[in-house]
Amino acid sequence: MPYSIHEIEVTQPLPTLTLAENITGVGLIVRRYDRAIGFLMQPWDQPQIDQDTIASWIATKLSAKIIQEAIRDEWKSPEITNRPSFTQG
């Protein structure tokens, strides 16, 4: 029951994965800007996994985490943390 492990970067176009004949499933290390945000394991018995299937798996399991990471990245942005003062002093 071997699984194939793949890294997926959600800020890039999703790949179509081609699997070896003896593979019975996949593990996906899901990253956003090179930082791991999740790991998915799925049984799979076909030679390929298309982009839509991968997107569906990620959306089902990790959509909240992806949104959290996007918000966290925006909060760390200098544009937000260095706002000008509106008070006169």
Image (cartoon, rainbow, N blue to C red):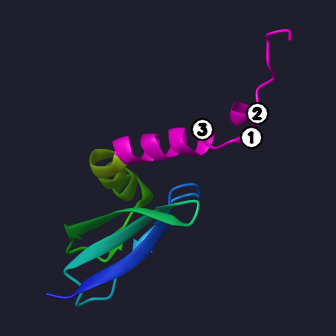
Q: Residue at image x 43%, y 58%?
A: 51
72 is within the stretch colored magenta: yes
Q: Residue at image x 48%, y 47%?
A: 69
Question: Would you name the residue on which mark 1 appears?
Answer: 78
Which of the two residues, 71 or 58, is positioned nearer the viewer here?
71
Question: Would you name the residue on which mark 3 appears?
Answer: 75
Q: Amino acid at mark 3?
A: Trp
Q: How many numbered dots are placed on residues in this image?
A: 3
Q: Marks 2 and 1, how far apart in space?
A: 6 Å
Q: Which mark is residue 82?
A: 2
Dot in front, 2 or 3: 2
Position of residue 40 in the picture relative to residue 80 (left or right): left
Q: Of helix, strand and loop, which one carries label 2? A: loop
- Horizontal and vertical percent position of residue 25: 22, 76
Q: Amino acid at mark 2?
A: Asn
Circle nearer the N terminus (2, 3): 3
Q: Among all residues in the image, which is located at the extreme left?
A: 1
Q: Amino acid at mark 1?
A: Pro
The range drawn in magenta is 63-89
- Horizontal and vertical percent position of residue 37: 41, 59
Label 2 close to label 1 by CB (< 8 Å) = yes
Q: Is residue 66 above or below residue 27?
A: above
